[in-house]
Every structure is written in C-alpha cells, then in structure tokens.
Amino acid sequence: MSFVEFLLDVGLAFLFAAPIMISNAAPALLGGGFPVDFYKNFFDGKRILGDHKTIQGLLTGILSGLFASIVVFYLAHDLMILRYGTLGLQYPMWIGILMGWGSNFGDMFGSFIKRRINIQSGGSFPVFDQSGYILFGLLWSWPIFKVMPWQFIVTILIIAPLFHLGANVLAYSLGAKDVPW
C-alpha cells in the first residue's frame, strides 16, 4: 500500500465515522431539556443516567447522525464504492439513524456505568468516554454494511478517541465545557 492509498483510507474512514462523531457532539451543543431517565433512580438508589442525558439531546444526536450520513453519502459515496465496493452505503438514511442511535446509546451506557461505580456526572471515565460511543455506533450500524473494511475499524478506533479528546480540550479552553474530557 502506498502512502497516498494509506491517506485515502484514513480520510475515508474518518468520513465514514463522521456521523458517529457528529451525533456524539450534537447533544452537548444542542441538547438540554427533560432527562431521558425521567429523574428516576435505579434500584441501587442512584440516578439511572443523570441530568445531562436528555430527550432533546438524544433526538438531536440521532438527527445529526442522519444528516451527517446523507452529506457523507453525497461527498464520498462514489469514491468509497471504487475503493471498497458497495459497503451497504446505498442506505445512507438508515446508516445515519443507526449510527446516531448507537453513538448516543453508547454515551448513555457509559453514564449508566459511571453512576453505578460512583463517578459523578461530568466525571472522567477514561477509555470509555473516548471510545464507547464509537463502538456502539459501529455495532448498531453493522447490520446495514455488507462488508466493513478492517482498515476502517482500526483507523476509527485510533482516530476517533484522539479526535474526541482534542475536541474536548479545545472546547474546554474556549470555555464551552467545564471539564477537558
């Protein structure tokens, strides 16, 4: 594989994962409102998810994944087909919805686990904070894809957590976030 092919694979993997990453960021920017857990506690007496996982954030995340996948489809569909075959990309709306739902489910699952192990809302949960949403976004969308190139998975699992951490540090330095994770 040449260096140009490597850069092409990295760029396409990044585009491929863009709906997952965008749908993870959207609730922080556009969320708010009523909590998904309806202020309920789990049987251990702790909140199920917490105040930061809201219905508006969930819907915003899913819809942003949908819109991002449609944009990616029109930007890179032909190039991805030439490079990898169909990949199942003929269903951009379903892919976006599944990636958005999976990404947000992964984030909510992380919050659920945090509450169980006494990490407060906004507290750091290393590794899962940076990659849980990606894993669930990929898992939820997996049934749509005919074949997902291993290069995509490896690249996404390396790039997305680094991108996530960098975006959070930037948002913190700009005052848009209270914590840098």
Image (cartoon, grey):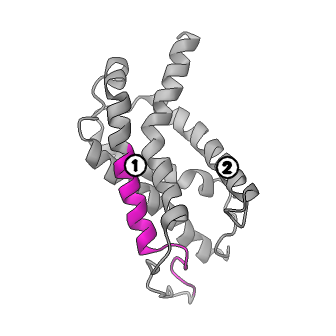
Residue for badge 2: 165
Q: Which residues are magenta?
A: 46-68
Residue in the picture at 30% in, 23% down: 85
- Magenta stretch containing residue 94, yes or no? no
**Where 124 sits versus 80, above or below?**
below
Task: Decide if residue 180 is on the left or right side of residue 83.
Answer: right
Residue in the picture at 70% in, 51% down: 170
Q: Where residue 158 sits: x, y (%)?
A: 60, 37
Residue for badge 1: 139
Compare residues 166 and 50 and report the one nearer the observer: 166
Task: Decide if residue 14 is on the left or right side of residue 158.
Answer: left
Q: CA distance from mark 2 to mark 1?
A: 21 Å
Main structural element of the magenta stretch: helix, strand or loop? Answer: helix
Compare residues 149 and 170 and report the one nearer the observer: 170
Between disc 2 and disc 1, the foreground one is 2
Quarter of the view holding residue 103: bottom left
**Disc 2: CA contacts within 10 A as few (<14), some (14-19) or many (>=20):** some
Which residue is outermost to the left?
A: 90
Compare residues 132 and 56 and report the one nearer the observer: 56
- Magenta stretch containing residue 64, yes or no? yes
The reply to whether dot 2 and dot 1 touch (C-beta < 8 Å) is no
Residue in the picture at 50% in, 85% down: 42
Q: Where residue 89 sits: x, y (%)?
A: 29, 35
Q: Amino acid at mark 2?
A: Leu
Image quarter (top left, top right, bottom left or bottom right) of the C terminus = bottom right
Task: Decide if residue 130 is on the left or right side of residue 77.
Answer: right
**Where 44 sits versus 103, above or below?**
below
**Disc 1: CA contacts within 10 A as few (<14), some (14-19) or many (>=20):** some
Q: Where residue 34 sits: x, y (%)?
A: 45, 81
Which residue is outermost to the top?
A: 2
Which residue is outermost to the right?
A: 173
